[in-house]
Image: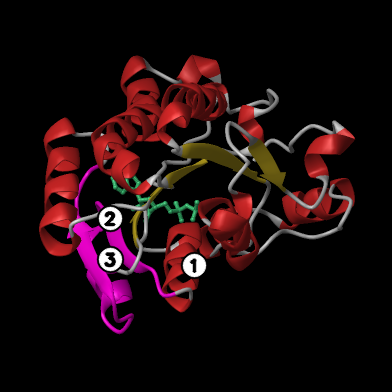
Amino acid sequence: MSKRVAIVTGAARGIGLATTKLLLEEDVTVVMVDWDGETLMEAAKDLGDVLPLDLDVSKPDDVATMIAETEKAFGRIDHLINNAGVADFGPMAETDFERWRAVMSVNLDGVFLCTQAAAPALKKTQGSIVNIASISGLRASTLRVAYGTSKAGVIQLTQQQAVELGEFGVRANCIAPGPVRTKLAMAVHSQEIIDAYHDAIPLNRYGTEVEIANVIAFLCSSKASFVTGQTIAVDGGFECTGVGLPAL
Ligand code: ADP
């Protein structure tokens, strides 16, 4: 049997890179997609069975290239992990239309475009989709007018995908990560914010990229064969407390 093939978007760093590494350990071939070509090529250099593609998931032509290159190289798609995203936080008054569209075009349009384009191939393999939302998509908080709305859209879009693709044996699920200890988060979160998160999260800490990747790999795998249309918060229990997110 041929190896499984996964497309991971936003694979140059963070959750996408951790997911790539985990899938490689599970003997899955990974198509790594990112628009930050330099970081992507550096990350992909020593990983082994990967195909790095420097593409923008919000551009229909780029997405068509992503599918064509994957099919040309491997002839199949088993998993699509829609992880590419932009985290841009600001109040409504400072979110002009251009900024709003920049967030929506990657976080929401990108998930729509990549899934629509991958669906015919996923139907052939009875594959699976995992979309990366955020706990910001599950409840409102300050500064997340565009980001939170885009992520709430991803949660609904996941359900639409699950309903429409279910009859073909294709599953679609969603992860809503809480605060994750990425380099970027650690650079922008003040000590005050870090302390506030630690107090508010029942497990009293940030998550790691690998802890998010573990749940993505589970949802991809046949262990989750009867799970579809679901959003799983991977957040140390933060979501169930109902405590608001700190203003960044
Ligand atoms: P996380 O904390 O979820 O890992 P990051 O911001 O560290 O988030 O990673 C998101 C990745 O998605 C980055 O590598 C970024 O370059 C990539 N990305 C963002 N927008 C696009 C896009 N339009 N097309 C492809 N990749 C993108």
The image quarter in which residue 173 lies: top right
Q: Callout 2, which amino acid?
A: Val
Q: Which residues are magenta?
A: 27-56
- Kindly state the secondary structure of the residue where label 2 is placed: strand
Q: Residues within 10 Å of mark 2 (few under 14, many from 20)?
A: many
Spatial distance from mark 1 to mark 2, Cα to Cα? 13 Å
The reply to whether discs 1 and 3 touch (Cβ–Cβ < 8 Å) is no
Residue 49 within the segment the image draws in magenta? yes
Left or right for 19, reference 210: left
Ligand 1 within 8 Å of the CB at mark 1: yes
Circle 1 is placed at which residue position?
18
Circle 2 is placed at which residue position?
33
Which of the two labelled residues, at mark 2 and mark 3, occupies the earlier sequence position? 2
Q: Residues within 10 Å of mark 3 (few under 14, many from 20)?
A: many
Q: Measuring from the top left, give residue 160's x and y in whole percent.
A: 48, 21
Q: Residues within 10 Å of mark 1 (few under 14, many from 20)?
A: many
Task: Say which residue appears at 48% left-offset and 63% top-offset.
Answer: 19
Ligand 1 within 8 Å of the CB at mark 3: yes
Circle 3 is placed at which residue position?
40
